[in-house]
Image (spheres, rainbow, N blue to C red):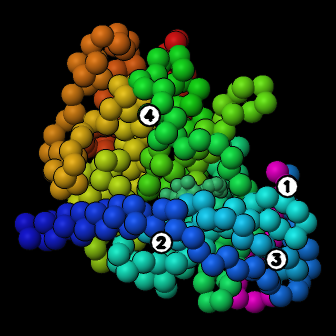
Amino acid sequence: MIYGRFHALFSVIIYVKVRLIYQLMHNHIMVHLPTIVKATSPEPQRNARGRDSSPPLSEGPALAREYVLIEEIGVGGTSKVYRAQSMDGRDVAVKLATGAVASKISEAHACSLIRRETIALEKADHDSIISLIDSGVFDGKRFMVTELLEGVGMRDYLAVRGALAFKDAKPHLLSICKAVSSLHNLGIIHCDLKPDNMKVITGHDGTETIKIFDFGFVKFKHEGEICTDRCGPFNRLGTPNYMPREQILGNTFDHRVDIYAVGTIMYQMLCGNLPFESMNPREVLDMQINKMPEDPRTRRPELNIPWGVNAIVMRALRKRMEERFQTMDEMAKTIDNWQA
Ligand SMILES: Nc1ncnc2c1ncn2[C@@H]1O[C@H](COP(=O)(O)OP(=O)(O)O)[C@@H](O)[C@H]1O
Ligand SMILES: [Mg+2]
C-alpha cells in the first residue's frame, strides 16, 4: 500500500523532471519544416463561431487543405507546435504529436493524447477556449490545427505584473471559471489547468481575453470517475504544483481537480507566489497531499487581500474535495459577488 503510493509519487516526479529537462533542451532548436498535405474530400461544415464542426476525422476521408509549417513556436513532452499557414492564407497553429524518449511518452502515446485533445476541442465551445480548425494524421503522426494565439503566456504575464489586485484578477478568474464550467457541463475535465496552458490576448481596444489550451491530459466523465492505476496511462499525468491530493494518489477524482487548480491559479494571481514552492517536485507532492498552504493574507499581509477573497481561495484548495466549491459555477458566482 505504502509502496504503491510512493511508486505513484515517483512516477509523477520522474515525468515532471524529464519533461522540464526536455523542454529546456529543445527550446529554440531548428527543425525540418514539412508541408502537411491531406487527401481530397468535401469542404468542412462550420459552426456559428466559424469553427470546423465536421464529424471527427478518422483515418478515413480527409479534407482538401494543406498546411505549411513556418516556424516552431512551442515544444512540450508530447508534441511540437508550429506557426503555420493554411492554403487559404490563414495563420494557424499546428500541434504535431512527437513523443519523447526523455519524457517517457512514446509517439503512439503522444498521438493518443492529441486524439483525446481533438475530441475534447470538437465539443468545447467557449470564447476563452482555443478553437479547433482541423485534425488528422500526417506521416503516421497525429496532428491538430487550431487558431493561432498571438498573446503572452499567462506565466509570463504574471511574472511581469507580480501580484494582482483582486479587481484586476477578477475578470480573468471569471473568464477561466466560466470556460471551465462550460467544459464540465459537457463532461470534460481539463486536468492540467495552469498558467503555462493559458494565454492573455490583448485586443485593439486594450481589453484582455484569456484563452485556455493544451487538453492533452483531459478526462471524459463517461470514462468513469474511478481513476486508479488500473485505468490506463492518462490519469497520473499532471503538474505537481496544481494537482490536488486525489489526483496525485491515483484515487477517485472528478471535475473538482479543476476547481483545485483554478484555486491555485487564483492564489498565484493574488500573492505572486504558488501555494507550495520547492525546487524538489517530490516535496511539492508531499505538501499537496499533507499540508494546507499559508493563506494569502498571511503570506502577503502588506497586500490587504480582502477576507472574503482569502476565504474563496482557501475553499478551492481544501484537501477533501467535498469541502471545496462543488461546481465551477458556484466558485464563479462567489467570485462575482465579491465587489472589487
Ligand atoms: N494555438 C497556439 N498558438 C500559439 N502558441 C501555442 C498554441 N498552442 C500551443 N502553443 C505554444 O506551444 C506550447 C506547447 O503547447 P501545449 O499545447 O501546451 O503542448 P504540451 O502538451 O506539449 O504542453 C505552449 O506553451 C504555447 O507556448
Ligand atoms: Mg502545455
Crowding at dot 3, Cα within 10 Å, few <14 / some 14-19 / many 20+, comes out as some
Residue 60 covered by magenta stretch: yes
Give the residue drawn at x 65%, y 89%.
Answer: 139
The CA span between labels 2 and 1 is: 28 Å
The residue segment tinted magenta is: 49-61
Q: Which residue type does callout 2 highlight?
A: Thr
Q: Which residue type does callout 1 highlight?
A: Gly
Q: Which residue type does callout 3 highlight?
A: Glu
Query: In this figure, which residue is indicated by the disc labeled 4?
Result: 159
Q: Which residue type does callout 4 highlight?
A: Ala
- Does the residue at mark 3 contact the one at mark 1 (Cβ under 8 Å)? no
- Does the residue at mark 2 contact the one at mark 1 (Cβ under 8 Å)? no
Seen in the picture, residue 214 relative to 211 is either above or below; the reply is below
- Residue 143 is left or right of residue 242, and the answer is right
* Figure quadrant of residue 123: bottom right
Pick the residue in front: 319 or 282.
282
Residue 165 x %, y %? 47, 17
Instruction: Give the label on residue 78, or none.
Output: 2
| Among the two numbered marks 4 and 2 on one chain, the one whose residue lies closer to the N terminus | 2
Query: In this figure, which residue is indicated by the disc labeled 3?
Result: 66
Query: In this figure, which residue is indicated by the disc labeled 1?
Result: 50
The CA span between labels 1 and 4 is: 34 Å
